[in-house]
Image (cartoon, coloured by chain):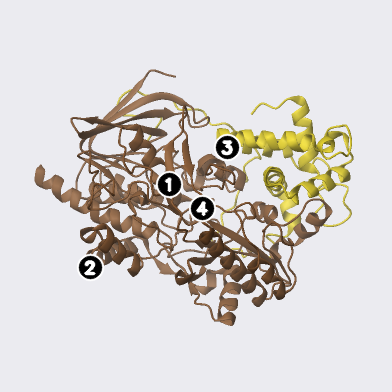
Amino acid sequence: MKLLALERKNVHAILEAFAPHTATEGLVPQKDEVDYVEAYEIIADSSTDRARIGVRAALWMAMLAPMWMGIALCTMASLPIMDRARIIDRMLASNTFIVRELTLLLKIGAAFALMGSRSVRARSNYDRNAVKRPSDPIVLRAPVRERPQVSLPLVARTSSPGVV
Amino acid sequence: MARLMLEDEADFVVVGTGAGGATAARVLAGAGHSLIMLEEGPLLKTAERPKELIHAMRRAMRDFGTFTTRGMHPFPLLQGRCVGGSTAINSGIIWRTPEDVRRDWIDNYGLEELVEEKGLDRAFDIIEDELGVVETAEEISGNNALRMKMAAQKLGLPGKAMARNAKDCEGRGECLQGCPGEARQSMDVSYIPRAMRDGARLHTLCRAMKVRIENGRAVGVEGLVLDRDTRKPVGKFFVRARRGVIIAASVVWTPVILRRSGLRGLVGERLQLHPGSAVVGRFPEPISMGTGATQAYEIPMRERGFKIESLTLPPEMLATRLPGAGPAWQKLLTDLDHYAQWASIVRMKAHGTVRPAFASHDADVRFTPLDRDLKVMREALATIAKLMFAAGATEVYPGIARIPQVLTDPSQVRLIEELDLTTADIHMMCSHLFGTAVAGRDAATSVVGPDLQAHDVRDLYVMDASVFPTNMGVNPQHTIMALVWRAAERLAERARAAA
C-alpha cells in the first residue's frame, strides 16, 4: 500500500501513541526504537482488498479523531503524544462498534510493531522463564523486513514456478 | 498477465494440500496412481519459515488472517495458505468423530458406507499410527494448560489432555510459525512428502479457478499461476485428469470452485461454523505462556454446545488482547509472562452461505449466529472466567463490550451471565468450518454421494470438510482425514479395476 506523506506521518503518530515513549512506568519503548510504519504496511499489504480498505479507514478515522471528537482542529500528528494516547483509549472503549473495531486494527499494528522489536519484547518479559532445550538451534534472526524473494520464472509445460 | 500456459496430466488431480487433499494424495499415490497436487500457496520448508509472527502470518496464513465473513459484524476465518493448508498452522488436535454425529450422518444422510464403525475406526487407527497421535504429556503442556487442568478439577468440569499428532513435541509453543522440530505432523511434513515419494507431483502457487467438465465428466482443472511475493496472477495452467478431479480446497474455496465450474443446487449452502472467543487472565505467579505446547488441555462440554481449550498466544497477540492504550496498557505489558488465555469454540446451529464474490477472485461468506448460539457463547465465556478465578487469576479480561474490561472478583462473572450478548460485543474468530458441498444419499438434499462423487458430474470428487452434513462440536481434522481415507481407498480400487 502506498502511503501519502500525511498518512505516513500519522501512522507513526497514532501507533506510537499506544505506548508513548514519554510514559514514566510500564513498558516504555525508546523514541524510534520501533518501526510502526513498516508493521502497518506489512499488515495492509498482506490483507484482503476489503481489509486493506478497513486498515486505511482506521487510519483516517484516527487521524481526524481530534476533529470529530471535538477536541481540536488538527490531525493526530499535531497533538502531544499523551493527548493522542488518551484519544485512542477513548476510541477503544467507544460504544460504536465500527470505531472500536477500526481502532483495534490499529492496536494490532502497534502490538506487532512493538513485540517485533527484539529489545522491546525482551523488556516485556514474555520469554523471562522460557525453557531452553538442548536441541535449540542457534538462530540468526531475520531482519525486520524480509528481503523480497526473486520470483521464479515461468517454465512452460509440466512445470510451474513452484513445481516440486 | 503472461500468456504462458502450464500443462500437465495425471490419473488424478487434487486441488488443495490440507488435511483432505493430502490424505487423498497419500492413499491414491500409495495405491500406485499417478497424481498431481495443486496448491495456491507456497511450499514453506521448516527451516525457512520465519519465526517473527508478522512474517510467519504473512507467509503461511491466508491474507494475514484478515479474510472475514461479510455483514455488520464480520469475524475472521483463519486458514493456512501454503503447502499443508491449515494443518501447517494449527495445533494438530485430534478427535475421532463423536458417536452421536456418526449416527446422525447414517440415520439422516444415508452415509452408512462412508462412516460405518469398523471401517472408520480402521482409518482412524492407521492415521493415528502414521502421524504419531498421543495425548499431550504434562511435562510439555506448560502452565497455561496446567492451570486450566487445576481449575477444571476444582470446578468438577470434564477436562482432559489433548490428543495431538505431535509425538515428539518439545512444547515450544510455535505451532503457528511452523513446528521447528517437525514434531507436529502437519501435511507438509507427513502425507505430502510421502505421496511424493510414491510418485505424486506438486505444483505450488497454482490457484484453481474451475473444473473443466466435458460431456458431464470432470476432465481437468484450470487456473492461474501466482507470483510468489505479490500473489498476483502471472500465467495460466490446465492440468488434465484421466480418472478424476478431487477438490479439497476448504469449506470456503471448494464451493467457489464448484460454482465457477457451473455446479449449482446446494453448493455453497449450509455453511456451519465453530466460532471461538477467548478470555485472558492475569496471575500473581509467572505462567510463561510461551513455554509449553501451543494447545495441550481441553474441557469438552458437548452437551452444552461448546468446548474450552488452552491456547498459547504469541506476545504480539497477547499484547493486542490486553485492554486499553497508553500508560495503563503499558503497565500490563511489563509482565507478559503472567497471563494465561483460554478459548471457547461453540457448535453453532446457524447456517450460512458461500458464493464467489462479484467481479473478483474473492469469496463472499455470510454467517449470522442465532440468538441461541450467542447464549451458548456467553455461557462458554462465563465458564472460562470462572475457571480463571478458580485457577488463581487476580484479574480477568473477558474482552466483551458493555461490561468492565477488567474483572477482579468472581462475583463479577454474573455481569457476563446477565448480558444480552450480541455479535457486536465480542471478538470471534473461526478455524473450524463445515458444509457447503454436503454429502448424502439423496441428490435433492446433498451435493456429493456417499462415495464423495458429485451427484451431477462424473469423476468429480469433494474431499474436505465441505462434505460434512453437520458440524461436530470437536476439532474436525481427524474426521476429514478418515472420511477421505475411506473414500480415496474405494476410488483407488475402482480405478484399478477399471484399468
Vertical relation: B25 (above or below) B256: below
Q: Residue at x 40, y 33 (%)?
A: B207
Q: Nearer the viewer, mark 4 or mark 2?
A: 4
Q: Which x, y percent locates residue A96?
A: 71, 47
Q: Which x, y percent locates residue B349?
A: 45, 58
Q: Which residue is mark 1?
A: B85
Element class at badge 3: loop
Amino acid at pointer 4: Cys
Mark 3–mark 1 contact, CB under 8 Å? no
Q: Dot 4, how many residues are within 10 Å of its Cα: few (below 14), some (14-19), or many (20+)?
A: some
**Chain B image colour:** brown
Q: Say whether residue B148 is left or right of residue B212.
A: right
Vertical relation: A129 (above or below) A18: below
Q: Which residue is mark 3?
A: A47
Dot 4 or dot 2: first in sequence order is: 2
Amino acid at pointer 2: Lys
